[in-house]
Amino acid sequence: MPETTTTPAAPSAAAAPAVRRKTSWAAYTQRYGAGTALVALLIFNALFTANFLTPANLLYVQLRQAAPVGIVALGMAMVIATRGIDLSVGSVMAISGQVGALALLSGTGLVPAVALALLAALLCGLFNGTLVARYGVQPIIATLILFIAGRGIAQLLTDGRLQNVDDPAFQFFGLGAIAGIPVQVVLLVVVAAAIWFVARSTPFGRYLVATGDNEPAARLAGVPVRRVKLIAYATSATLAGLVGLMEVARVSASDANNTGLGMELDAIAAVAVAGTPLTGGRISPVAVVIGALMLRLLQNTLIAHGVSREVAQMITGFIIVAAIYVQRQAGEGAG
Amino acid sequence: MTQSSPSPPLLDMRGIRKSFLGVPALAEASFQVNRGEVRALIGQNGAGKSTLIKVLTGVYKADGGTVTFDGRPVAFDSPHAAQLGGIATIYQEVNLVPYRTVTENIFLGRERRRFGLLDWRRMNAEARELLAGLDVHVDVTRPLREFSIATQQMTAIARALSFDAKLVIMDEPTSSLAEHEVSVLFDVIRRLRDSGVSVVFVSHRLDELYAVCDRVTIMRDGRTVDDRAMADISKYELVSKMIGRDLAEVRRAASRAPHQAEAAPVIEASGLELGQALRGVDVAVRSGEIVGLAGLLGSGRSETARVLFGADAPDSGEVRVDAEPVRFAVPRDAIRRGIGFSPEDRKVEGIIPQMSVRENLTLALLPRLTKAGIVDRRRQQQIVERFIERIGIKVSSADQPIRELSGGNQQKVLLARWLCMNPRLLVLDEPTRGIDVGAKQEIQSLIRELADDGLGVLFISSELEELVENADRVVVLRDGRNVAELRGDQISEERIMAAMAHGAAVEAEDGAR
Amino acid sequence: MNQLLAFRTRASNVLALQRHGALIALIALLVFGIVRYGDRFAGENLANLLADDAKFALVALGMTFVIMSGGIDLSVGSVALLGGVVAAQASGAGLVPAFGLAVLVGLALGSLNGVLIAKVRLEPFIVTLAALLGVRGLALYLSDKKAVVASGTGSFQDFGRWELLGLPVSAVFMFAAFLIGAAVLRYTAFGRTVLAVGGSEDAARLMGLPVARTKFVVYAMSGALAGLAGAFLAAQTGSVSTDTGIGWELSAIAAVVVGGTLLTGGVGSVMSTLVGVVLLQLIFNLIVFENSMGAIEISSFWESVIRGGFLLLVVLLQVKLSRRRASGGTAPA
Amino acid sequence: TTVGGGGGGETAAEGTKAPDPACKLATAQDPGNSAPPQNVPVAENAPKLAKKDTYRVAFSQNASNNPWRLAETESMKAEAGKLGHQLTITDAQNSQAKQIQDIRSLIAQKPDALFIAPITEQLANVVVDAAKADIPVFLLDRAVDTNIAKPGEHYVTVIRSDFVQEGLRAAVALARATGGRANIVELEGTTGSSPAIDRKKGFDEAIKQCPGMKIVASQDADFTRAKGQQVMETLLQSNPDVNAVYAHNDEMAIGAISAIKAAGKTPGKDVVVVSIDGSRDALQAVSRGELYATVECNPRFGPAAFKTMQEYAEGKPVPTVLVNQDRFFDQSNAKQFIEEAY
Ligand SMILES: Nc1ncnc2c1ncn2[C@@H]1O[C@H](COP(=O)(O)OP(=O)(O)OP(=O)(O)O)[C@@H](O)[C@H]1O
Ligand SMILES: Nc1ncnc2c1ncn2[C@@H]1O[C@H](COP(=O)(O)OP(=O)(O)OP(=O)(O)O)[C@@H](O)[C@H]1O
Ligand SMILES: [Mg+2]
Ligand SMILES: [Mg+2]
């Protein structure tokens, strides 16, 4: 993907290049429907929302809230690239959060607790991946199994009770910052960069999209399609597990009932809204991040302006369709 | 462009322009078809034949030009409209619905009804009858995907024939058919012509054009360069016009190196069995040898190829590579042993449609292009450029998605995918399917060249001529069994044909060798 | 992959078997229930169960056609909520006007999905995901975020009590709808076109089939059925709560797939979706019965695990059945 | 969209200012529980319950996804165990449709008595069905539509809290804490749920009496801690002069407190938080001074439920409405109740 590093701080700096690009302005708007929506939201908020353009708000509220969805969506994007889908991410978040919290509370210490939680998430991913890659179960159903059962498992770990965790070292995952940048945001950037690099420059990255684009052909070309899918699902679940831990740390309590609820749809929307087709064969981490930022900022804009939930939902639905509509018009040139 | 026939043509396309993202595919192309004539349409891969057909039938919208059909100006906006207008089309890639039955594929869109509801009995009966007219006898209530690609092609033909159209267009209908089917098809085409229907026939097999066509339109680079009576043009002239330069007809460099029978086989398979398809196939390929695999449709050639490559696992039988028994679980295992495989159905099993030519070409090579886990882009680019040039792939850039290439050029990319691996053994299932004459010869001589350098080739083709010209040895299959093996001077179209048809009879003859 | 012999031979027989896989599981569960819980389980309990299933079944019926056409409709739950809301609000006017309104509203929203997917050619997943949000918002807006209560008396309220042929009328309606659906699939050109479009959209277009119109109809139908399902719910319970329809899309997809319809489109069966719906709902019922036996206690957490586990079982059963069929037991891709 | 009022940057912490004389609530005491309903009829026509030592009873819970519900279920289980009753529990997982199905399944088992914690008021039809099957029904924590299910006829009684009163009590507490001058964020419970509706109603009506108390933002936060935190983070940015939070339950309040801290403000000082429920975590927050007060809404229905059933079986008169007596926790008493809180 081209250099669309639209950080939320960009609008003021965007003036100069805008002049040069003027000719293709319309084309850009279309190509990056979600990015354009993001910029429009930023401008709107800068003008009409009190205290919006403060580093504290941008970094610690907007970006920090968007990062978890963004990270899960990046994993989701890998699965979607293989023409799959992962509905279980929310439940996996709950499992990992519960396991992590339980381990911490039972005194294993920070590192083993985190490792255990991620291991649990990884196992979930391998379960999904095995069903899809080895048994050929349709992804939506394969992951629906853990979507249903996974939350039950997470709840069973503590009979549904909340676990308060206020280990300061652990809380760093949710509340800490590195060089003034919230941990979540740092992780988002790292994960996005890593996936971008892998997708672009490693054989695995090429295999990922080849598998999603035409699986039989990829297999005949020597692509290890099963392993590719397994890795995709495992990565998605592990990232979800990581985010589950971050959420527990942020709230200082693990809540198996609510952690990650609805995350699968948020993540899928983030992937799709920036133009990645759900039919596989494509991956663009930058677009995913933009999609996640846009959707989160949209929610927050509506909240900040006192729009009630039901109206907010209508607006969100409309904007999602509008963004992909605009993008599709751009892709239409091909005839 | 003057017409010799007195009556106005049935179809008259003039000044047709069409470009894709600024790259022209058709530039001022024109095309006429007279009533009751069989018209050949010919040109190199990527010349614009399929695009012209798609513009006519409403798949694409032309950027400019006029179309007159049956005396009226038309601009069909969908294949459906074209059908209603009296044009039945068989598109280049088999475009049917694999999961649905043969009957449905024939009748979709104009089902037979009774009391307003579908009359399955009648449709099945009619479907059976239609196919019987093409000498195809299958269970029409089975899903299409269960049948060989040839049967699928015949189904597409049956569908087109059942339309009672004024014009039937066939875009490379014979590329996956064998002699017998081709001759059946020709009978049908002649019958159509006799009943006043016009036919457009696209093929890269020149003999076929001479056998059945009345006139020929030659295209080059999106333009119409000539329009002649078939009888007035020699093969030589035809090819020269098509290619655009005076090509001395390349006779096969008869460098069939008398190679050592002693050379150890690269691959050796014995007693392969797989369900109904294979019931005991033995085949061996030595290094430097081109082995042809012949047989009628459904004789088990493709299946043999797939088993050798690890794409399917045999029920029983043994495969040895360098005399060492192997069991390939997945194609990747075979690739590691230096085997490449170009499958028969490029759309389903060959191309990765959205990926660029570059990536498609180097997909199998990636592990070797990797330094410290990272793909070496420069080397990748070098290799891609080398092969694009070497086998003349027509692309606007290496970054073009492969799905935008013409059929023949896609095939070339797939061949290049394996050639760039420097394989020890290439298994090629109908590799020249849909490739134009010029390119075909280039590819054939390339394969020969590589074979002389020690490459082993297993070559499947339904064109006997091709086998005769290229193979050092021909193995003939029938009903999933070896029935004959011909080598050297024994290889002739007649003998292969006899073995395919009667099997055992030839084996006796074989004893003479 | 369609060249894979092993796969080829499997193709269609297997799908029949998968259907039977679900049917076998259903019969097994029914027998188990009757043997273990006796009359309390059979009889009225099952009749009630069918009546309750009707609304899910209608949604799943629409979903079956959508999935067979190669698409997906995530908006059904929200459309059902909206249908229920308007039906309850209009319930004073009687059963027919209320139901009619719900169907119309569902039809309108389904058509909107249909236009965006078939004409504008946006991806079904994302379009209906947006609709899932937007329509829920609209329904909550219309209901003022409160449960909508149907007017006290009248035919609307009685609907839940009517019986026909000894079954609750909604169950009868459900069977009728599925029979019609099955007939449409098998005996109309539309039905075959749906399958063709799902099997290969490109091919269907080149064959001159009305691809866009078919897709449009499929989504419009799904919307109308979801609206009707909402009206059923409103009539049966006398009200529509704001939680209505949450997660219905996933249950419907699960039912369709358990029934043996391929999510990739092109192959499917209507009646087996009904089997899938009843099967998946029956599990809830059985768990309640088992709980009241007092032998073990199944908490709602376990309930989720059991449902997931059961889904896994059915899916693996299908995989196994389809492999057994594969000629000579070759390893599939 | 922008925040009104002159309160700009200053903080209206407790006691720094004299109470707003225009606001009577600011000086009022906790109004306590609502007066017991008058002239409540006695359940007479409901299905009878034979007198036995132990019973086979069933409890239809509507969700198990929050501490309050878990405590309620736990209490029912514990009490049944203590008394030796055989209890079957179902959980509707937050879905009305499922709860109806659950109750139907339970009716089919013919338990001696049926306890229902209805998800919404709209379970009346199925309550009527239970009565027709001759099963006495006891409703817990929420009522059902009395136009359809007649009290004392289709069900025996409803044991519940007064959500409107809870909202009112929270309003009084908040007025007292802020001296009647407050820019309030209201964190609402799950859309459409009756506690969310009633707690909003009670609170909003009450603060109308005080011109200085304004709700600057009111947002849905699903009764959960994480949502409470997230919504509060956003609202604190766009409304920096917020100095009070009213949360419909403790979980959201705790989330809000985290957000307040993260924004560099001090809960209890810069921003006063009041909520409802009285959970253990909330009482701890109260004793730390982060939460100003929480109005109890006791989930422990077990003892009252089974006691009522026993009395009904014994033929004692049972009124068709029983309102829980709930406490009020603030700094003065929170510590001593932490241990017993749920
Ligand atoms: N959808 C498309 N997008 C972009 N370019 C296209 C598309 N379809 C065809 N082309 C280009 O148009 C040119 C003509 O292609 P066409 O398929 O008509 O060739 P053809 O004469 O049928 O060749 P062949 O003999 O190989 O089938 C080619 O260069 C091809 O790359
Ligand atoms: N579902 C099936 N049931 C029975 N036989 C089948 C089925 N599918 C394929 N076959 C048969 O398996 C045999 C091997 O097919 P294969 O594709 O290998 O033949 P082929 O010689 O390559 O012919 P083609 O030219 O059609 O590719 C054929 O007889 C084919 O008809
Ligand atoms: Mg072509
Ligand atoms: Mg073949």
Image (cartoon, coloured by chain):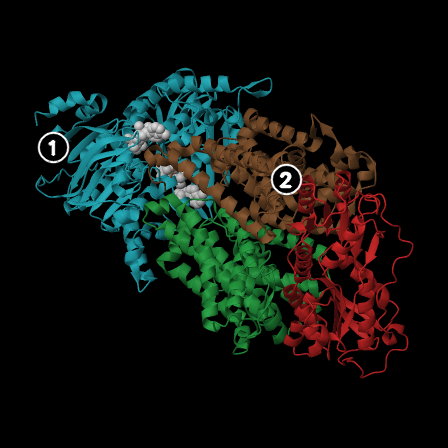
Chain colours: A green, B cyan, C brown, D red
What kind of residue is marked 1?
A: Gly
Q: Position of residue A174 (x, y in %)?
A: 56, 71
* Mark seen at residue B488: 1
Residue D96: in sight, yes or no? yes
Depth check: A251 or B172 in front? Answer: A251
Q: Position of residue B270 (x, y in %)?
A: 19, 36
**Left or right: B215 in relation to A125:** left
What kind of residue is marked 2?
A: Phe
Ligand 2 closer than 8 Å to the CB at disc 1? no
* Mark seen at residue C56: 2
Q: Residue visible at 36% across and 52% down?
A: B359
Mark 2 on the same chain as mark 1: no
Say which chain tag 2 marks: C
Say which chain tag 1 marks: B
**Left or right: B156 in relation to D335:** left
Instruction: Give the SS element for disc 2.
Output: helix
Quadrant of the rendering where the C terminus of chain B is positioned:
top left
For residue D279, what is the image quadrant? bottom right
Quarter of the render that holds ligand 2: top left
